[in-house]
Image: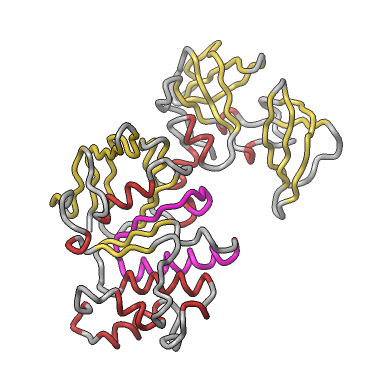
Amino acid sequence: MRVELDGVSKRYGETTALDSASITVEDGEFFTLVGPSGCGKTTTLRLLAGFEEPTDGTIRFDGESVSNLPPEARSVGLVFQSYALFPHMNVAENVAYGLKFENPPGGVSTDERITDLLELVGLSGFDDRDPTELSGGQQQRVALARALAPGPDLLLLDEPMSALDARLRERLRRELKTIQNDLGVTTIYVTHDQAEALAISDRLAVLSDGAVEQVGEPERLYRRPESRFVADFLGENNVFDGEVLRSEESGSRGRTTVRADDYEFELVTETPIDGHVTFCVRPSAFGTNVDRNRITGRVLDSEFLGETVRNRVSWRNRELVVSLREPPTGERLTVGFDPADAWTIGDSGDETPNRPNR
């Protein structure tokens, strides 16, 4: 199923929960809505499920408007954050509840459908278990099986792993992605976890204050943020504001000098630029052996994270985050970054053409 939100807004009195959102999700895609609490993620999901009607705009499934269709007419499966399993029903009865309004797809019996789904989610033999006897991860899988029971064309998941520990979340999201790929069902997933959104999505949309900031593939959004909000929100970033001092063509690129924090940085851009510029540098772009854009700061603290050491560094009345393979040897740390490893953002938040981080 192809899903389109065309200029969709949702207002509650004077409060705007979603503001002129336009998003297209392709058939069979795993699409994620990510953003901080209150940004409009769950409102969007409720609009797609039919629990709310848009104030403005149109929602289309496969080109047909569904804005005024009730939930039962939309062929949508929904997994809630709390799973919402019925405690007075066993596992099989919970899954069967998903077939209350529709016959199983493919002409199979209800019992066959339940058996197939429990096998799909790795819970074969759990038919007679009570939900209270299950772990959080197992309850999440039962909720997923129940949502998939009628064979929906669209699967909606509202932060279904938020209550699970980190290791279980990682394992279940891999399993969820595998199931989604096997079934080919269009899936829209809501989370506030940036790492989860990057790991699981074919594409994602970053939302802020009810507005869509940017839509695209995870790597593009991570490496080429089009607004300061996306740069700050999606993974750690060091964001600089400055003025262009010089910018000229150098071969097929532009070589630009920017003054930020009373320091001159060199950047590589696709074309020469001028005026005010915001640019960002990922913590991993810094290195002790890089001889360009070198800065020296005071190490505030260091965290050993296994493969890397995360360092908070005080430099010119601001704090930077620097990721290195080895811990610093003293209180002072000197690092640099390659001019091509920065990504510039225009003053208004529009993207300024530049070379992507490598």
Q: In this view, does 197 lie above or below 73?
A: above
Residue 299 pos. (x, y %):
79, 34
Q: Which is more toward the observer, 265 or 133?
A: 133
Q: Determine the residue positioned at 49% across, 26% down.
A: 344
**SS assignment for the magenta stretch, majority:** helix
Q: Determine the residue positioned at 20% across, 80% down.
A: 106
Residue 133 pos. (x, y %):
52, 80
Residue 2 pos. (x, y %):
22, 54
The quarter of the displayed image where residue 121 is located: bottom left
As drawn, is 122 to the left or to the right of 239?
A: left
Quarter of the rendering occupied by the C terminus: top right
Would you say residue 171 sits in the magenta stretch? yes
Number of numbered discs present? 0
Q: In this view, does 49 lie above or below 271?
A: below
Residue 266 pos. (x, y %):
60, 21
Among all residues in the image, which is located at the extreme left?
Answer: 64
Q: Determine the residue positioned at 48% across, 63% down.
A: 173
Q: Which segment did they paint magenta?
A: 167-196
Q: In this view, does 60 lie above or below 209?
A: below
Quarter of the rendering occupied by the N terminus: bottom left
